[in-house]
Amino acid sequence: MPILTGRHRYDAGLSLRGHPPGTTIEAPILAYLIETAHGRVLYDVGCDYGKLADPTLRRRYYGAGGFPFGPPIMHDESRLPVLLARLGIGPRDVDAIVLGHLHFDHAGGLRDFEGADIHCHTDEWVAARENSDGAYFADDFAGNHRWRFDRHEKSLCDGLRIVDSPGHTAGHRSLVVEPPDGPPIILAGDAADLQRNIDDEIAPGILWRDREDLALGSIRRLKALAADERAELWPNHDIEHWRRLRQRGWPVLAARFRSPPASLEPPLRRW
């Protein structure tokens, strides 16, 4: 299930490398809830609402010189725990979080999910500590979490697969979801902000160490994977794509699974 946690307005050049300045786009800030037999998984968790609600913190984090984005639009009722509560789900009902990367609009909400297993690429953690592009907020990662660092692509559980897609950041990851019915879905994350990134093979505007080659390689790899597996490839910050998903009725992304071992009662486990 794609979940709208906020909106952002910024220059299109931040999503499309080489785009002339002066065009403002509206971008959804999304998280994704995936139900599996082994537990509930979130892909990304949106922004830290506290940094937006408090005027002092808002100026400190979003008004700093060199920060490429302005503050997102987010309200208390847009916080991910509030939205999940409408589904009868509390923060402790989330078993694992896969972070596409650690930028403020993808990892800021971690403080609302104390105690969860957090899957993150090791290289992404290093890049976040360096904060070379100014879009990482170090205290977003300071909570009581169980971090699971690695450098390998892997199956998180049956029907849920993490794939590497670096370029926008050092350790960016996308997520392949295999629903029990319908085609697989590849959540591109910020490997492809917009449908134009995919269709025209345009790198994101912000790149790790200016590695456009990595970013384009990731876009092409995700497109090839989608073609091979007859999967849908979802851009991450495309408002028109978001509107199309809403028209489809907010589809729940339920990963394909085998029955869990009988010893797992209830059928939830930590990764």
Image (tube, rainbow, N blue to C red):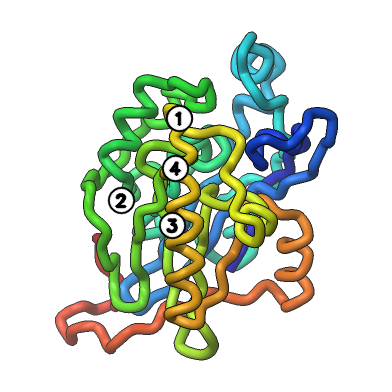
Q: Quadrant of the N terminus?
A: bottom right
Q: Nearer the viewer, residue 98 or 54?
A: 98
For disc 3, the marked residue is 174
The percent coordinates of residue 6 (x first, y second) are 70, 45
Q: Counting residues from the N terminus, which is met first, the one under dot 1 or under dot 3?
A: 1
For disc 1, the marked residue is 140
Q: Are marks 1 and 2 in contact (CB under 8 Å)?
A: no
User: How many C-alpha atoms fall within 10 Å of the one at disc 2: few (<14), some, or many (≥20)?
Assistant: many
Q: Nearer the viewer, residue 122 or 261?
A: 122
> Regarding mark 1 in the picture, which secondary structure is present there?
helix
User: How many C-alpha atoms fall within 10 Å of the one at disc 3: few (<14), some, or many (≥20)?
Assistant: many
Q: Counting residues from the N terminus, which is met first, the one under dot 1 or under dot 2?
A: 2
The percent coordinates of residue 132 (x first, y second) are 44, 20
For disc 2, the marked residue is 117
Amino acid type shown at disc 4: Asp
Is residue 82 shown to the viewer in this render? no
> Regarding mark 2 in the picture, which secondary structure is present there?
strand
